[in-house]
Amino acid sequence: MLNIKILGGGCANCRRLEALTREVVADLGIQAEFFHVTEEEEIYAYPILSTPALVVDEQVLSSGRIPSKAEIAGWLKK
């Protein structure tokens, strides 16, 4: 089971990133547990410069933008 974290304060972009990622997980039939990290201290523990950020199994895959569904799918298939 994948551990997926969305880092961000809950803005529209953070919600959009989570929604896209959930769609990809469902499309691929992957089991995943989602967490939305909103606490600044927890967010700053990751090597990112801006939010929203996508973290899968403690690896930062993107930050500061919303990747495409194809990008997310490519990352999650690995």
Image (cartoon, rainbow, N blue to C red):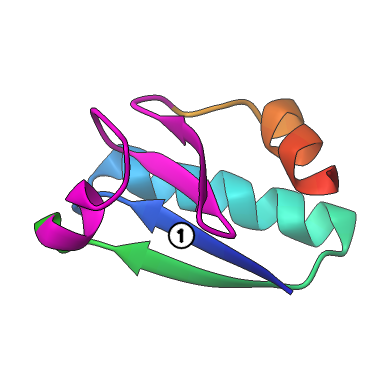
- Outermost residue, left side: 40
Q: Is residue 78 above or below residue 35?
A: above
In the image, what residue occupies the spot 82% across and 64% down? 30
In the image, what residue occupies the spot 32% across and 38% down? 47
Callout 1: helix, strand or loop? strand
> Can you tell which quarter of the image residue 78 is in?
top right
Count the numbered circles shown: 1
Residue 4 is situated, as x and y percent measured from the top left of the image, at 55, 61
Where the N terminus falls, by quadrant?
bottom right
Residue 58 is situated, as x and y percent measured from the top left of the image, at 51, 57
In the image, what residue occupies the spot 33% across and 26% down? 64
Residue 6 is situated, as x and y percent measured from the top left of the image, at 41, 54
Report whether residue 10 is seen: no
Q: Is residue 28 magenta?
A: no
In the image, what residue occupies the spot 73% across and 38% down? 75
User: As drawn, is 58 to the left or to the right of 38?
Assistant: right
Report whether residue 25 is seen: yes
Residue of label 1: 5
- Crowd around label 1: few <14 · some 14–19 · many ≥20 (10 Å): many
> Can you tell which quarter of the image residue 35 is in?
bottom left
Looking at the image, which is closer to me, 62 or 65?
A: 62
The amino acid marked with disc number 1 is Lys
> Can you tell which quarter of the image residue 51 is in?
top left
Residue 54 is situated, as x and y percent measured from the top left of the image, at 47, 44
User: As drawn, is 65 to the left or to the right of 18?
Assistant: left
Magenta stretch in the rendered image = 41-65
User: As drawn, is 10 to the left or to the right of 71?
Assistant: left
